[in-house]
Image (spheres, rainbow, N blue to C red):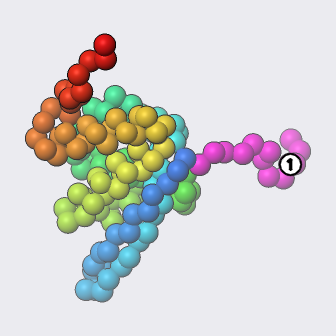
Amino acid sequence: MVDNGPSALRRRIAPAVSLTLELEDDSGGHLTRTFRLSFDFNAIALVEERTGLTLLSGDIWKNLSAKVLSIMLWASVLAQHAEYDSEEGLHVIRSFMDAGNADLIAERLFDAYIAGLPADKRKQLLAAKERALRGEDPTMEPEQTAPPAQ
């Protein structure tokens, strides 16, 4: 086989958001790790493959266990940080996670997921999130307040 140099194929990188984790290391010092998170279909498929849950239906957000959250973080990192693309990379990503930063990670993963959606889908998901935060059923659309057109 002839090596023709770099591939002519060009991959699209989905929009990304930044996540900075401030951690204590084993010597009492501080460690900072910053990642760019994005969900292209490669990341979405990897999450489905490893967890059996889907991002596309939204069910995954109701099942955020340590396994699911860490797989989502790992998968969302790979497009921007290919050095983590291995089982060892997954273990390293998990070493940066703890109970103190799990909520921040979940929030930034949600932000990364919606960043790659079309504007109308992004608006729907953000509205559903707001309804859920108010204790309302996120699957129900708010009642129409304007009278029907005549």
Quarter in which the C terminus is drawn: top left
**Residue stretch rendered in magenta on the structure:** 1-13
Q: Is residue 39 left or right of residue 53?
A: right
Q: Is residue 141 left or right of residue 21?
A: left
Q: Does the magenta portion include 79?
A: no
- Residue closest to the eye, 32 or 124: 124
* Residue drawn at the location 48% of the way across and 43% of the way down: 116
Residue 120, position as x, y percentages in the image:
43, 34
Residue 109, position as x, y percentages in the image:
36, 51
Q: Which residue is mark 1?
A: 3
Classify 16 as above or below 129.
below
Residue 99 seen? yes
Q: Does the magenta portion include 4?
A: yes
* Residue drawn at the location 55% of the way across and 57% of the way down: 80
- Single out the residue that lies furthest toward the top: 150
* Residue drawn at the location 41% of the way across and 34% of the way down: 121
> Which kind of residue does numbered mark 1 sit on?
Asp
The image quadrant of residue 102 is bottom left
- Single out the residue that lies furthest toward the left: 135
Classify 119 as above or below 57.
below
Residue 115, position as x, y percentages in the image:
45, 47
Tell me the chief SS of the magenta region: loop
- Residue closest to the eye, 108 or 121: 121
Q: Secondary structure at mark 1?
A: loop
